[in-house]
Image (tube, rainbow, N blue to C red):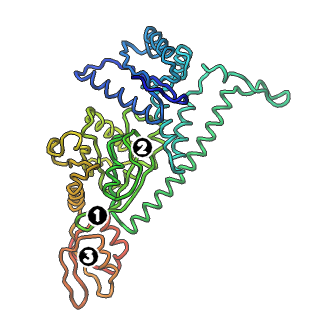
Amino acid sequence: MTVAQPPSATRAAVILPWERPDRHDDARAAEARLEEAVGLAASIGLVVVCQAVLLLRARRPATLLGGGQVDSLKETVKADNITVVIIDSRLTPVQQRNLERALGCKVIDRTALILDIFGERAATREGTLQVELAHLEYQRSRLVRTWTHLERQRGGFGFLGGPGETQIEADRRMIGDRIVRLKRELEQVRRTRGLHRQARRRVPFPIVALVGYTNAGKSTLFNALTGASVYAQDQLFATLDPTMRGIQLPSGRRVILSDTVGFISDLPTELIAAFRATLEEVAEADIILHVRDVSHPDSASQRSDVIEVLEGMARNGTIEQDWQSRVIEVLNKADLVGGRDAVGARPGNVVISAITGDGLPDLLAAIDERMTRAMEVVAYRVPLVEGAAMAWLYEHGEVTQREDGEDGVEMTVRLSPANRARFEMQFGRIVTCLLD
């Protein structure tokens, strides 16, 4: 039975151009990628009435697709009254223009689709700036002389003005000016985030950052651990802006949990650059929770996509080279595959279901254990009158031994390297280090 769509609904076709790599699971990988693209389109209200994988023998410079494929797609567009065709690949400006002419409708590529989603979901000033910057970087790459409406010239002033600048040059200049202003504003955001991180160091709590593929369940896990009400839906890129909340571990130690933007395969480079300020929260984290959707048929590939982005951050110096030593893999959505026993945990992994809460105590214990593993044992003699220093050690470390004497209190304590540095910076002049 055909369900009538509201007149305002935008009818779309999602097309995945697929080259033939030498891999045995080619068909499954193509279907998973197409399903993801359809989910992206549906997440912004498009009604997908046609979806298809088109095998490419070779990439055509003019249209990407073959001539017969373009003709067949044109007939489908006309028959199904399709308004927009989404090509789940990166199109050159020439390919996009030629396809629009051939199909008689709007054509967008994967990058433009993701940018539209981000533009709709950005809720904060920072998110809006980041998305606008990414949009402008993308639009600037579209300004080529193949667009005839940009070839008009504006006359100069007086007799010495010459023929003037072309419309494309004026548009490129205006976009460039706006990009400069946005980057300046985002740099201020970056500095503000830096000040916030410095403030957290002065009242030091370890940072635990959630990362993962989009729709892996990061926001649901964040809400389950913190009791917050961050927007969480079964859709791609449900949340964009980072959120931070404090939680208490079984040992009594407090940490700050940070929810970050989800990753996706072929994440546009414009977005990676624009969201640098957000991704720096991952770089500052003491522990990184890599949340994976264990029920997804392409979970292994999604894991590789996330690691690829983080490795790129390591190569450009945004995150430390040994970032993998701080990672705990969280295999989420175990309830969809028969429970935790059906998944089976391995060293370095924790199997959970964020929606049911199953496995969350094990996850908190794993975070606690990882925090303890990284701690250093050190002893201090603290003057009796320095109650603030003793209280600091009790609050931010694990005091394993205490001996009260006439000239002070000797305390053996476990501290993270960061907390030890913070303690000695704040109280180093009044305490004596006895054991290192």
In percent of width and height, residue 246 lies at 36, 62
Amino acid, disc 1: Pro
State the CA–CA distance, disc 1 to disc 2.
36 Å
User: Is residue 223 rendered to the left or right of residue 195?
Assistant: left
- What residue did someone put label 1 on? 417
Tell which of 16 and 165 is nearer to you. Answer: 16
Tag 3's secondary structure? strand
| Residue displayed at 34% across by 76% down | 428
Q: Callout 1: 10 Å neighbours few (<14), some, many (20+)? A: few
Tag 2's secondary structure? loop
- What residue did someone put label 2 on? 238
- What residue did someone put label 3 on? 433
In percent of width and height, residue 224 lies at 31, 55
In percent of width and height, residue 321 lies at 31, 47
Quarter of the image with the C terminus is: bottom left
Tell which of 214 and 13 is nearer to you. Answer: 13
Dividing the picture into quadrants, the one containing residue 228 is bottom left
| Residue displayed at 38% across by 47% down | 232
Q: Is 366 rendered above or below residue 331?
A: below
Amino acid, disc 2: Ala
Q: Is label 3 or label 1 in front?
A: 1
Image label count: 3
Q: Callout 3: 10 Å neighbours few (<14), some, many (20+)? A: some
User: Is residue 37 rendered to the left or right of residue 294?
Assistant: right
Q: Is 32 rendered above or below residue 19?
A: below
Q: Is label 2 or label 3 in front?
A: 2
